[in-house]
């Protein structure tokens, strides 16, 4: 009873810390930002942007076309272009509506009095979800779906190849249903439908395989451990509502190593940026899925070895003397 009374407040404090602390400390930290134009014209812009120490990581480009290409390739979140009429801001609300808004405020606040800053959204978010609220809200349900799939496969006693087939089949079905809801119905996603379904399915498989794999190796307690890792840390550290560079370090980096963060980044790349910068998060999800499924097969093999009867030793025939 004492253990339960103590454990519940500890878990509550851990949950509040994992969700509230990153949200309360949201601010740009080495946020990739481009500056385009002649060096003479951009010198003042760079000086103003770097006045906030550690806020922006400046990338220099020769002209607006190069800056646009960098935004479309997900190298930077936006760019400030020096023009004869004053600074021009290029943003990508599809990458992060919050970052796009922050850049507008930062550039407008540093522009000379009376100067109007022209803003162009190079890669816009879906018109049906301009603030990215629906995309952000989908992170936790998908994570819970993966946890549920891994838990059900474990509790039903499926092992070996049957467990792997059930996990892959469930993830594929979840990815298909999620793409139908987010793309076909809500219009939150605007990219290739099958690519989005594949990303959603792989994200689910990475979670479900991790949960089932932990349970196969250490028992049913692995379900709780996997669920806590994914929901408490994976979801809150994902940067889905802002960007990884907006979270305190090392939270932003850790979040991209976990399935919810990698899945969100990959989904944005596939849906809005034609697959740009998709290799890293795709490999992260693949490793989670592969290691989880491998752990399921290994746990099943170890359990079968422990429960199989040992062959009886053959008795040597004895001869009467």
Image: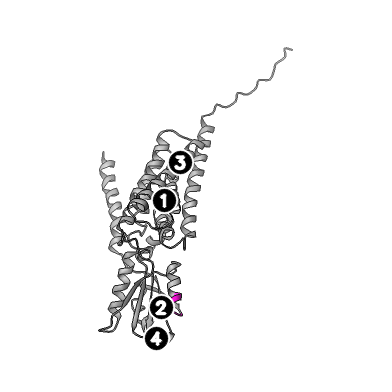
94 vs 229: above or below: below
Q: Position of residue 183 (x, y in %)?
A: 37, 53
Q: Position of residue 91 (x, y in %)?
A: 36, 70
Q: Main secondary structure of the magenta part?
A: helix
- The quarter holding residue 305 reads top right
Inspect the magenta stretch and tell me whether residue 232 lies in it. Answer: no
Residue for point 35% across, 46% down: 144
Residue for point 32% across, 53% down: 186
Q: Residues within 10 Å of mark 2 (few under 14, many from 20)?
A: many
Q: Who comes first in sequence, dot 3 or dot 2?
A: 2
Q: Position of residue 100 (x, y in %)?
A: 33, 68
Q: Who comes first in sequence, dot 3 or dot 1?
A: 3
Q: Who comes first in sequence, dot 3 or dot 4?
A: 4
> Badge 2 is on which residue?
35
> Badge 3 is on which residue?
169
Q: Which mark is residue 41?
A: 4
Asked whether the beta carbons under mark 3 and mark 4 sit within 8 Å of each other, the answer is: no
Task: Please report the bounds of the magenta region as a residue range.
Answer: 62-66
Q: Residue furthest bottom?
A: 40
Q: Secondary structure at mark 1?
A: helix
Q: Quadrant of the N terminus?
A: top left
Left or right: residue 309 compared with residue 270: right
Q: CA distance from mark 3 to mark 4?
A: 57 Å
Q: Secondary structure at mark 2?
A: strand
Q: Residues within 10 Å of mark 1 (few under 14, many from 20)?
A: many
Q: Which mark is residue 200?
A: 1
Q: Who comes first in sequence, dot 1 or dot 2?
A: 2
Q: Residue furthest front?
A: 184
Q: Which residue is more in the foreground, 231 or 302?
A: 231
Inspect the magenta stretch and tell me whether residue 65 lies in it. Answer: yes
């Amino acid at each position: 009873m004492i253990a339960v009374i103590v454990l519940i407040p500890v878990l509550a404090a851990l949950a509040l810390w994992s969700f509230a602390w990153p949200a309360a400390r949201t601010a740009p930290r080495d946020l990739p930002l481009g500056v385009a134009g002649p060096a003479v014209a951009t010198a003042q812009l760079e000086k103003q942007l770097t006045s906030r120490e550690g806020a922006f990581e400046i990338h220099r480009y020769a002209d607006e076309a190069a800056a646009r290409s960098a935004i479309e390739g997900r190298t930077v979140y936006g760019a400030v272009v020096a023009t004869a009429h004053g600074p021009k801001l290029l943003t990508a609300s599809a990458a992060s509506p919050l970052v796009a808004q922050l850049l507008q405020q930062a550039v407008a606040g540093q522009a000379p009095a009376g100067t109007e800053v022209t803003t162009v959204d190079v890669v816009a978010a879906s018109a049906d979800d301009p603030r990215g609220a629906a995309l952000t809200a989908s992170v936790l349900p998908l994570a819970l779906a993966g946890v549920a799939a891994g838990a059900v496969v474990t509790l039903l006693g499926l092992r070996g190849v049957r467990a792997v087939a059930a996990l892959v089949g469930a993830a594929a079905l979840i990815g298909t249903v999620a793409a139908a809801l987010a793309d076909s119905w809500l219009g939150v996603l605007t990219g290739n439908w099958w690519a989005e379904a594949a990303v959603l399915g792989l994200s689910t498989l990475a979670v479900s395989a991790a949960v089932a794999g932990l349970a196969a190796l250490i028992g049913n307690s692995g379900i709780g451990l996997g669920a806590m890792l994914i929901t408490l840390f994976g979801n809150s550290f994902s940067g889905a509502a802002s960007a990884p560079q907006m979270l305190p370090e090392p939270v932003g980096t850790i979040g991209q190593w976990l399935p919810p963060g990698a899945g969100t980044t990959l989904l944005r790349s596939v849906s809005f940026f034609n697959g740009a910068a998709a290799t890293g998060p795709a490999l992260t999800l693949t490793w989670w899925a592969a290691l989880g499924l491998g752990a399921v097969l290994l746990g099943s093999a170890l359990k079968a070895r422990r429960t199989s009867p040992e062959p009886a030793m053959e008795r040597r025939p004895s001869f009467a003397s």
